[in-house]
Image (cartoon, rainbow, N blue to C red):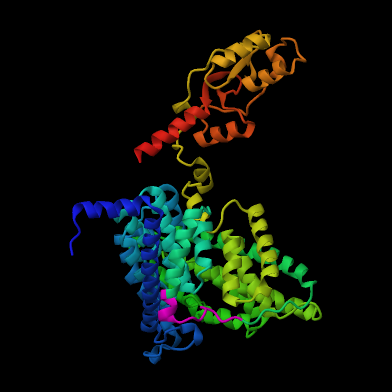
Amino acid sequence: MTLTGPVRGQIGTWLRERGSGLMALALLIGVGSGLGAIAFRWLITSATELLTGRPEYTTAPGAAHAWLPGLGVWFLVLAPAVAGLLYGPLVYWLAPEAKGHGVPEVMYAVSERGGRIQPQVSLVKALASALCIGGGGSVGREGPIVQIGSALGSTVGHRFKLTERRMRVLVACGAAGGIAATFNAPMAGPFFAMELILRDFAVESFGAVVLSSVTASVIGRAVMGNEAFLTLPDFHLQNPGEFLLFALLGVLIGVAGLLFSKVLYGVEDLCDRLWRGPEWLRPGVGGLLLGLLLLVLPQMYGVGYPVLGNAIHGNYAIWFLIVLLFGKMLATSLTIGIGGSGGVFAPALFVGGMGGTAFGMVVHGLLPGIAGSPGAYGLIGMGAAFAGSARAPITAVIILFELTGQYSIILPLMLAVVVATLLSRTLSKDTIYTAKLSRRGIDLDARQRRGRLPDRTVADVMETLPDKLTTSTKLSDAAQRLAQSVDSVLPVVDGNGRYRGCVTAGAVAEVLGDGTVDNGEVGKLLEVPPEISSENKLVDALDSLVSVEVSAAPVLDERGTEPVGWISHRTLLSCMGTTANTR
């Protein structure tokens, strides 16, 4: 049946303008994200089986290729190189944004591009990441599925000509659905999307994101089963004194999370400096180096959830846990540095699990009457590492709670996660995700504060300085002048014409209304707004105006002594409106 033009128009209006229309699209994206997660999981398994002869190589690390036993373990050197030769040209020619761990690109698209993501990103990211992980790339599934689901949401939003605000919501719906279906974590999906992608918790957005997450999770469970992606031991709090140990764990693993971020970008910089060939060939050649690392430490092959599970259950010695911790940092960093495609969420959990379990073994040996099972510290460490590296404490708590299904984990987990997050904020401006953007000169925090303010300087929009008052102007005269001014604030100069500050209508009215001062002088009511120069960005000027609750202020010269213009809330609002109309 073909819909007529008027009917199509009514449907389009409903989808663009009504809340129920947004929910319908969220439902559609949830279905697509769930199916996409299933397909992506199948691609990873197929690629892994093709390149190793096993659906999951780390269940038997160090074994020969099941189909090519004559190669022995040396196939580990070839697998990453062969995979790189396949996905390198694919990413380079079709979707360069599919390179890397994916989440920063989605964050940037939501913040700066109105949620617009190229539709081919879904397919290219799925194929490239599946080949990378299947070929031994030591990265996670969450970054790719976030980018795959987000690209789907963007494509749907573009197809129905949605506004930028709704387009962003649909991108978040795709990210939440992908996380929920991939990790069988319907609660963690929405919080990941809201905390990291949208970076707010608006009611309308939250409802749509939750609907998409639940839908994707139902579809994922129907096909892939109801089992969590990782089987974890029961958690028991043995002694209230353990809370001090969990706080210390938060400090240590928080530092490990920050170190992971530093190593990641340090290795990437090193690879950039050393590589001189064509970018499409970089994953193939670099794959040989990754293969040599896998030859020494085959537990780093792919995502490595079986290895993480073994560590949490206490199957490794302390020294080997430390080796695995630093080995994962290096293997993931090298995978990304050579141009691989995959996420850093799972590696962060891996780092935290190794460090936490090692810490648990040490304190259990020293304080057996207080410290509980080492595996419990491994669980807490997983959340603390992600919180320290990504600075997403809500997501960290929710996903570990969903993995364990035990309420008893909440208090110690929250303590360690908060400690790790505070430490991260103290020691580093960026997270493991925003650092990639900051290195390109993109500050998402400043852009979020800016809203729709254009990225221009005060000099571009400042107005002519209004008539000045002098410090000796009588308050009654000042009241009349201020009543006639547009912004209810005027600059003040002394008898020699030097700028001294500003006076507001509110301050004058308060003194005159009080009756305690009989027509005093303006000089006694001066306020000095923060210095705003013509070179300041508009967002910085807005921060300065808000900080002292004045509606306008002078723009000062390079020396910061004399006013050369005037900037006001009214001007900034006009800039925001102009920007909105041009989008």
Location of residue 346 in the rendering, given as x and y in whole percent from the top left corner: 52, 70
| Left or right of residue 14, residue 104 in this image | right
Question: Is residue 141 visible to the viewer in this orientation of the structure?
Answer: no
| Left or right of residue 244, residue 346 in this image | left
Q: Is residue 225 magenta?
A: yes
Q: Is residue 222 above or below residue 514?
A: below
Quarter the N terminus occupies: bottom left
Q: Is residue 6 above or below residue 486?
A: below
Location of residue 109 in the rendering, given as x and y in whole percent from the top left corner: 41, 52
Location of residue 485 in the rendering, given as x and y in whole percent from the top left corner: 54, 17
Location of residue 35 in the rendering, given as x and y in whole percent from the top left corner: 37, 72
The residue at the point 63 percent across, 12 percent down is 478
The residue at the point 48 percent across, 67 percent down is 334
Quarter the C terminus occupies: top left
Q: Which residues are magenta?
A: 219-232
Q: Is residue 109 above or below residue 70?
A: above
The residue at the point 21 percent across, 51 percent down is 6
The residue at the point 67 percent across, 56 percent down is 422
**Which one is nearer the viewer's eye here, 535 or 64?**
535
Question: Is residue 96 visible to the viewer in this orientation of the structure?
Answer: yes
Q: Is residue 554 magenta?
A: no
